[in-house]
Image (cartoon, rainbow, N blue to C red):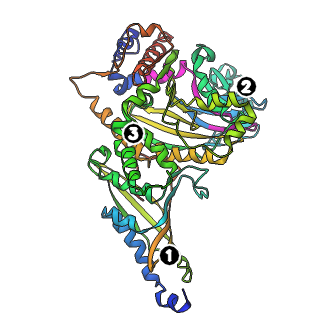
Amino acid sequence: MNAATVDSTALTERELVQFVYREASLLDQARYAEWLELFADDGMYWMPLSPGQTDAKLHTSLMHEDKLLLGIRIERLAGARTYSQQPPSRCHHLLQQPEVLSRDDEAGQYQLRTSFHYIETRKDDQFLLAGWATHDLVRVQGALRIALKRVDLLNCDAAFGNICLFP
Amino acid sequence: MSKYRNNPEAIQALVRPGEVHKDLYVDAELFELEMERLFANTWVYVGHASQVPQPGDYTTTTVGTEPVVMVRHSDRSVRVLVNRCPHKGVQVAGGTCGNTGKFFRCPYHAWTFKTDGSLLSLPLRKGYENTGFEHCEASQGMATAGAVHVYRDFVFCRLAPQGISFGDFFGGSLSTIDNMVDRSPEGRLEVAGGVLRYMHPCNWKMLVDNQTDTCHPMVAHESSAGTAVAVWNRAPEGTPKPMAVEQFAPFMSPYEFFEKMGIRVWDNGHGHTGVADSIHAAYSPVPGYWEQMVAAYGEERAQAILGDVRHNTVYFPNIMVKGPIQTLRVFKPVAVDRTLVESWTFRLVGAPDLLLERTCMYNRLINAPTSVVGHDDLEMYERAQQALKARGRDWMNVARLLEPGEADAPEAVVNGTSERQMRNQFQAWARFMTSEASA
């Protein structure tokens, strides 16, 4: 890729921010298959168990899933014998304006940080999680994809009940 | 009106050979008596010695609902103290862990206690002269567990000062802990990888029952493990099988697999699934590990250690150990319908990191509040907790493969789909709920 094509395809901040809004919006609308398509083939969703956690392998996480595992999760949600999702959970993300932390147009790599309040509900129960998401985005054949979505919950080390969807 | 407190016969009558009464799961008085008797008269897991390596190191937890602090005393022994100041009742050790130095200091009025619980000093001591303080309970310092036993770094306590000995209580069941520790080439474990904490709105015994319930995985986990297998089967041919699929897939094994793997029971409510085979038997080898084990133990012994692939071992009343994947789950009773599940993992000291990575992955996929397998199970527990209150059916059935006279043979190996281990737990439950009933 030469310099001219980089310039012509450089993403505006608005495009980056809109990507993050759209990602949350797809989850809130339960459009999970479309949501999964936002991930790069080797993309990961990571929700650490400890504040400031750096190791996803030798330390347990709440979630550390590649596209295969995320796909299993999504297919399961609609399964005829997935009794824990009958009725289904619903979620809502309330996002603060995403902040672009870094950008490298030549490499097509971007990082954004977004504070959120996340609500998940099922039957008569509802709970709130607060935290921030860090999106590592990559440009793959002209389109933005998620290389890593890291979700840091403010109370990641708390005793939770079920968290069934995707903060 | 007390239904059970002064009525050991009524408690005994709740456990029949092939069924148990719903009150074990829904009756608040029984829960209270469990905390007073069952969790005082049995040996209950407190923690692992690697959590408190240095004098003054402590960690806080609960035994039943009793708040305790496990601390390394100045003589390097591990002590278990009731975490309550004898002055005004304030929790002395704060947070989950730390180092308290040579003594605990209550943050309210600065009374201090040695790490064996004895009262060290209190401000304005003169004010207690000629008050009869030495006859007050407070002069004895913090209460301690009745007895503490450390077995290969696993710390257990019996809250009651008198009762069954550690060795008599656990008997042959300690072989599961032995096997897990022996899997380290250095014969040593360390707590590692963090702890998952998962709140369950159900009675603690539902979780214990579930550990040796081998007729539920292919049904309740069809949604999670079944979907994992289905998705994996669509992967292009030749794709290397991911570790996660290796861990999910065996949950979908047919009944015959679980029948053949067997169940072993020991006296006092302990027992394990996976005598001949288990869902942990077919994991890919970890490079370099076998050679380390052979160097440490010799080929024959290494083979014997790694060939023992026990699935779930229940240590009555409330923990489960998985030797081949180095996890320990504690089912902490909070209320009759509330249980905190803690899932701990261990590093096999000296073994390749990949083993800890595998263990952490298993813990995350199966035991986390975000785990789809966990969601499957919790849905069933919640439904049971609600529906057990229904009238018209008052008993829960545990008759599968009941054999006449089995209660007279405390140790046995039986068909892996038997509910023998559940019956074993209920017999122990009735025994330890009533043995001190007059005390």
B217 relative to A61 in the view: left or right? left
Q: Which residues are magenta?
A: B32-59
Q: Residues within 10 Å of mark 1 (few under 14, many from 20)?
A: some
For the point 34% across and 62% down, the residue is: A32
Mark 3 belongs to which amino acid?
Answer: Met
**Foreground: B1 or B14?**
B14
Does dot 3 land on a helix, a strand or a loop? helix
Q: On residue B252, which mark appears?
A: 3
B329 relative to B191 in the view: left or right? left
Q: Is residue B38 above or below residue B195?
A: above
Q: Are marks 3 and 2 on the same chain?
A: yes
Residue B391 spot, x, y in % from top left? 22, 25
Q: Quadrant of the N terminus of chain B?
A: top left
Kindly report which numbered mark, 3 or 1, lies closer to the viewer in this rendering.
Answer: 3
**Foreground: B130 or B272?**
B272
Residue B328 spot, x, y in % from top left? 55, 35
Give the labeled residue for mark 1: A99
Which chain does tag 3 point to?
Answer: B
A36 relative to A88 in the view: left or right? right
Which chain does tag 2 point to?
Answer: B
